[in-house]
Amino acid sequence: MAATLLSPDACAALSHQLPLWAIVDGKLTRQWTFANFSEAWGFMSRVALLAEAMNHHPNWSNVYATVTIQLHTHDLRGLSSLDRALAEAIDRITPA
Amino acid sequence: MAATLLSPDACAALSHQLPLWAIVDGKLTRQWTFANFSEAWGFMSRVALLAEAMNHHPNWSNVYATVTIQLHTHDLRGLSSLDRALAEAIDRITPA
Amino acid sequence: MAATLLSPDACAALSHQLPLWAIVDGKLTRQWTFANFSEAWGFMSRVALLAEAMNHHPNWSNVYATVTIQLHTHDLRGLSSLDRALAEAIDRITPA
Amino acid sequence: MAATLLSPDACAALSHQLPLWAIVDGKLTRQWTFANFSEAWGFMSRVALLAEAMNHHPNWSNVYATVTIQLHTHDLRGLSSLDRALAEAIDRITPA
């Protein structure tokens, strides 16, 4: 899937399509707090599979039970269709 | 935690303590089928943390969404307190 | 990448293309023994990324430092181009 | 292993004991750049095992092939014996 830069309208629509994400410093951002490191790591292990399969990798960090994921498309200097698709895929594997 | 071999009575009690496990070929055995590889892998990634932290490692296999775990204590040639403890810990991280 | 069944000639060529693998019970098979569970797990974590990205998953098992991978293509009831491609990719990430 | 706060002398000795780490903002810090995400992830998967086994978890981040690890001991508001031990363990699993 080739990444295409999102138009300003498409960016504005993200807040409805991805209500749990915010745009921070130009990056699509979401944070999770799990019960402990093990739960956080199980989630990260699934995000890693998604990222590699899409060949689109997050800027992400973890400390104990907290995971923060930031998405943007470096080559296009902005938010792209790949960021939106990866965020949607990550939402689908987020434990209820 | 030092492993101690389970007595015949303690082995017999396992079917009550660990109702989702069976003793197959002398090994404490359970199988899971998840929705897909990603879910199976997220679970395995958490089991790996448990196993390394307890320094007690399963004999386990995976094919796509199915994970099979067999526990026994090689050094003691049987089922030990460590197998029981690891099985209980694995049950606690099994998704509902 | 669509999987295509390997012809008998293509199967015969595997022993040259993949000298560290053997065909056992119709499955492309290789076993590794690492220094410890941590090394084995680091390798498995990379194989998981490959498998998910190719949407082709191994039949694999692990006990402590030993990893055994078996590849075949269930839907085609034999060895396919995907098995060969995944085996090649796994060889490339095998630590020297 | 109970964490004990490192004395000023012990902190000063870290630059000799852990020459690849620096103290940045009071945290023991090291960064790695691997060949690709897969290599970075294989390394992270091993660090996760160490962290959980020591029950001491890093503040870490990843973007594609780059991994940054920061260690400090939140409960003691400084660098502790656990940070030093975890850094040493991470150095031992760093690929040559």
Image (cartoon, coloured by chain):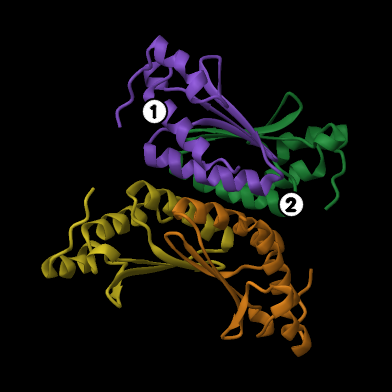
Chain colours: A green, B yellow, C orange, D purple
Residue D34: image location, x then y, percent: 68, 41
Q: Residue at x 49, y 42 (%)?
A: D48
Rendering quarter of residue C12: bottom right
Q: Quadrant of the C terminus of chain C?
A: bottom right
> Label 1: how many residues lie within 10 Å, few (<14), some (14-19) or many (20+)?
many
Q: Secondary structure at mark 1?
A: helix
C39 left or right of C28?
left
Image point 44% across, 38% down: which residue? D51
Please give the residue where the numbered disc 2 appears in the rendered image.
A54
The residue that appears at 81% across and 35% down in the rendered structure is A74
Q: Position of residue B77 (x, y in %)?
A: 24, 69
Q: Residue A76 got which mark?
A: none
Front position in the image: B72 or B37? B72
Name the amino acid, label 2.
Met
Give the numbered dot on residue D82: 1
Decide if residue C56 is in sight here.
yes
D24 on left or right of C11: left
Mark whose residue sits in front, 1 or 2: 1
Residue A38 in the image: above or below residue D71: below
Residue that extends furthest to the top in the rendered view of this protein: D8
Q: Residues within 10 Å of mark 2 (few under 14, many from 20)?
A: some
Chain for disc number 2:
A
Q: Nearer the viewer, residue D59 or C25?
A: C25
Residue at the image point whose x is 78% and y is 45% from the top:
A82
Q: From the viewer's perspective, is residue D89 above or below residue D79?
A: below
Q: Is residue A50 above or below residue A17?
A: below
Residue C49 lies, in percent from the top left, at 64, 56
Image height of C6 relative to A95, above or below: below
- Quadrant of residue C23 within the rendered picture: bottom right
Amino acid type at circle 1 is Leu
Q: Secondary structure at mark 2?
A: helix
Q: Quadrant of the N terminus of chain C?
A: bottom right
